[in-house]
Amino acid sequence: MTNPAIELDGVTLELGPRRLLDTASFTVNNGEFIGVLGPNGAGKTTLMRALLGLVPNVRGTLRVLGRPVTHGNALIGYMPQGRSISTAHRLSGRNFVTCAVDGHRWGVTLARSRIRRAMDHALAIVDASDLANRPLTELSGGERQRLLLAQCLLGQPQLLLLDEPLISLDPNHQASVVELVRRVQRQLGITVLFSAHELNPLLNAIDRVLYLGNGYAALGTVDEVITPSILSRLYGSPIDVMQLGKRIFVMSGSIEVEKHDHAHEADHQL
Ligand SMILES: Nc1ncnc2c1ncn2[C@@H]1O[C@H](COP(=O)(O)OP(=O)(O)O)[C@@H](O)[C@H]1O
Ligand SMILES: [Mg+2]
């Protein structure tokens, strides 16, 4: 039997005075697509960084793909929050994706032919082989996200951590990025943690949802987790859940909390 992708057993995560996780325990199975949600500051980014071995003083047991976390784990692909492609110059997509090859993981020891093969493979998976020959300036936000995804896939990771890849994309591009990640995740049989402000763009794609808030972590199906009682605990105030057609709204009184909570953030996005 393969190891679970992620296991937390009594994990406490603190940053300064804030306790982001308080003795949290959950298991993400191999090959799951998990939507990571929670109010601004709940610890979505910090959890991903902890899985990468970048957060000191984690208490409890935290395992990735059956092993204790290590810094620079080549089995993990990571797209940090706010990652964007500078379009100030006429770099092609292919050259942009190559930049990652010079990163710490790859060093300079890899033969050029091997790098080229890995690159062609990653670009093909995200359906960007042609795209990659065009200047970045000509690409849409959604097309650039495809190249960022190709970059994450270069090291053939078994676990992908995508931190808010939908930020600053319009709804159509959001939907295509979610579909792409879902297809790639299934095709490669890898595990994905995909954090987002809002649940709705992810609803059709995710296997389960990991909702963080108030030191708690709730992992389960949408029906199990998106309930007034669980979300009220995570938000620390009374929450209602409204379903309208295929969309779900998390409400605090008449305010839609997921939207409200992040409303100012898009403005600050570079
Ligand atoms: N390096 C750090 N030192 C101290 N506090 C931090 C650090 N990084 C983030 N925080 C704080 O930890 C909390 C969780 O942040 P974060 O993980 O970015 O949440 P989310 O991604 O869910 O918005 C926030 O209150 C943030 O201000
Ligand atoms: Mg974050």
Image: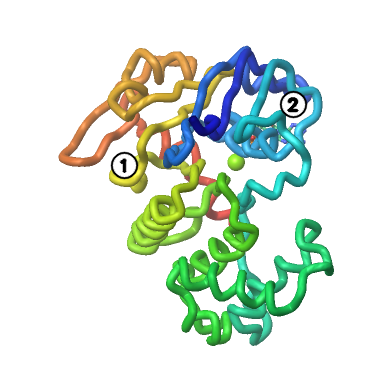
Residue at the front extreme of this rendering: 1
Image position of 181 with respect to 86: above or below: above
- How far apart, in angstroms, are the residues tagged by discs 1 and 2? 30 Å
Seen in the image, is 175 located left or right of residue 137?
Answer: left
Q: Is mark 2 within 8 Å of ligand 1?
A: yes
Q: Nearer the viewer, residue 50 or 191?
A: 191
Residue at the left extreme of this rendering: 245
Crowding near the residue tagged with mark 2, few <14, some 14–19, many ≥20 C-alpha atoms within 10 Å: some
Q: Position of residue 124 (x, y in %)?
A: 47, 72
For the point 20% across and 41% down, which residue is it? 246
**Mark carried by residue 203:** 1
Crowding near the residue tagged with mark 1, few <14, some 14–19, many ≥20 C-alpha atoms within 10 Å: some
Image position of 253 with respect to 119: above or below: above
Seen in the image, is 93 located left or right of residue 221?
Answer: right
**Mark carried by residue 15:** 2
Secondary structure, mark 1, is loop
Image position of 68 with respect to 113: above or below: above
Q: Where is residue 51 in the image (x, y as percent from the top left)?
A: 66, 35
**Foreground label between 1 and 2:** 1
Amino acid identity at mark 1: Leu
Q: Where is residue 213 in the image (x, y as percent from the top left)?
A: 53, 23
Seen in the image, is 53 located left or right of residue 251?
Answer: right
Which one is earlier in the sequence, the residue at label 1 or at label 2? 2
